[in-house]
Image (cartoon, rainbow, N blue to C red):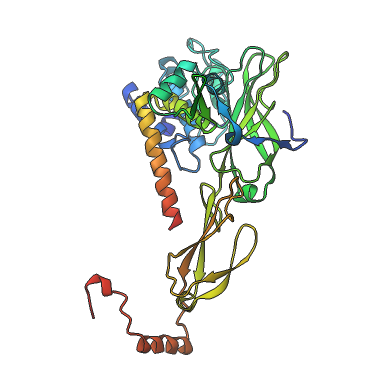
Amino acid sequence: MRSAQDTLTGEIFEEYAVLSVDELSRLCAVDRTYIVELVEEGVLSVAEIEAEQWRFAGTALRRARMALRLQRDLEINLPGVALALELMEELDALRRELERR
Amino acid sequence: MEFKDYYKVMGVARDATEAQIKQAYRKLARKYHPDVSKEKDAEARFKELGEAYEVLKTPEKRAAYDQLGRGPKPGENFRPPPDWGSGFEFSGAGAGAGDRDYSEFFESLFGAAGGARRGGHAFDSGRGESGRGQDHHAKVILDLEATLQGGSRTFTLRVPEIDAEGRLISTERVLNVQIPKGILPGQTIRLAGQGSGTGSGAAGDLYIEVDFKPHPLYRPDGRDLYVDLPVAPWEAALGATVKAPTPGGTVDLKIPAGSHAGTKMRLRGRGIPATPPGDLYVVLQIALPPADDEKAKAAYRAMADALPFDPRAQLGVMQ
């Protein structure tokens, strides 16, 4: 067991991260073809294209990992994952709307 | 150790068919999946569910488990019988280590590596590149003050590790982390070099996704915050300058005359101190003074006499 000694300082990943397909697939521990599939299904959006290479915003990491967990744990296919994520986002937005009242 | 009633966890009868078990798992997994569920103990329930399913869906494991009978009464101490496991061959042993941590009960029966790969726990690891250590991912729930003021917080994370005998064990790691001021829910703190190390290459990184506990005053929406501010009817009607709480301290807020319940006032830049900072929305609530003595009742009666006011004019039920 390692215990806390010094205070660790990190950065907010989403504020600076720009990810290539390879970086994103490494961070998610998946094959790069899986990332391509997520883009084709509309689960992930490409932030920009640089020298013909896709670049993702840092927020893609959380979304890709969530898609991966849903697919693995609930045994749903990719279109199902895409639908689930969209509905979950809508639900989140509605919950926040409710809280603003 | 505590005996686990896997049938009870899954809510199925002891003679449930494979199809019924699968159906129960699917239904409960959707309910308690940590990404989907808003239940408080979703993570623990999902883990328990995965473990129960792992045993009950595998005929050999289920048969072996059934041999134990119903076990001692819940909460009573359990020891596997001495002849436990003889005559059964468990498939899947030695599967992907470094992923799931099972209960002590499960491990005493099927060994630490007796499970298939299945996720949904707080701390899992990604595959590292050759020569580079593994990245780790975790999720923590913070108080809102952590992002408003910054400061350090201490977390205890469970880390799956392989011990000297090659068994999967789960250790606790205590981390003291400086919370970047202005971090938003759903964002991630990256701690370089705090993942697993390897002998040769660089250590992996630790990614901590943050979310916030509900706060008694402020409700976050992205980088903006909402706060309810009760005002007296005459403050709303006539206008007033009142004290209002903000994350940066109390401010004097000018309520315009003719305000009503639900009027939103924006205090620019007083939300979560991200870049750019969010705004604080003050939402007015009209608080009615109680009519609990003669003086108050008289004041209400005087108002009723003085004002030709029909609050239901819009409902088509004119007096």
Q: Residue at x 55, y 25 (%)?
A: A19
Q: Quadrant of the C terminus of chain B?
A: bottom left
Q: Quadrant of the N terminus of chain B?
A: top right
In the rendered image, the residue lying farthest to the front is: A51
The image quarter in which residue B201 lies: top right
The residue closer to the viewer here, B227 or B165, is B227
The residue closer to the viewer here, B67 or B4, is B4
Where residue B127 appears, as percent x and y from the top left, is: 58, 18
Does residue B236 sit above or below B111 in this rendering? below
Does residue B23 sit above or below B303 in this rendering? above
The residue closer to the viewer here, B248 or B97, is B248
Q: For residue B71, say whether it is visible.
A: no
Does residue B198 sit above or below B231 in this rendering? above
Q: Residue at x 45, y 34 (%)?
A: B33
Q: For residue B205, say whether it is visible.
A: yes
Where residue B289 appears, as percent x and y from the top left, is: 47, 78
Q: How many marks?
A: 0
Where residue B249 appears, as percent x and y from the top left, is: 65, 61
Where residue B273 appears, as percent x and y from the top left, is: 61, 49
Q: Residue at x 61, y 48 (%)?
A: B143
Specify whether B117 is left or right of B164. left
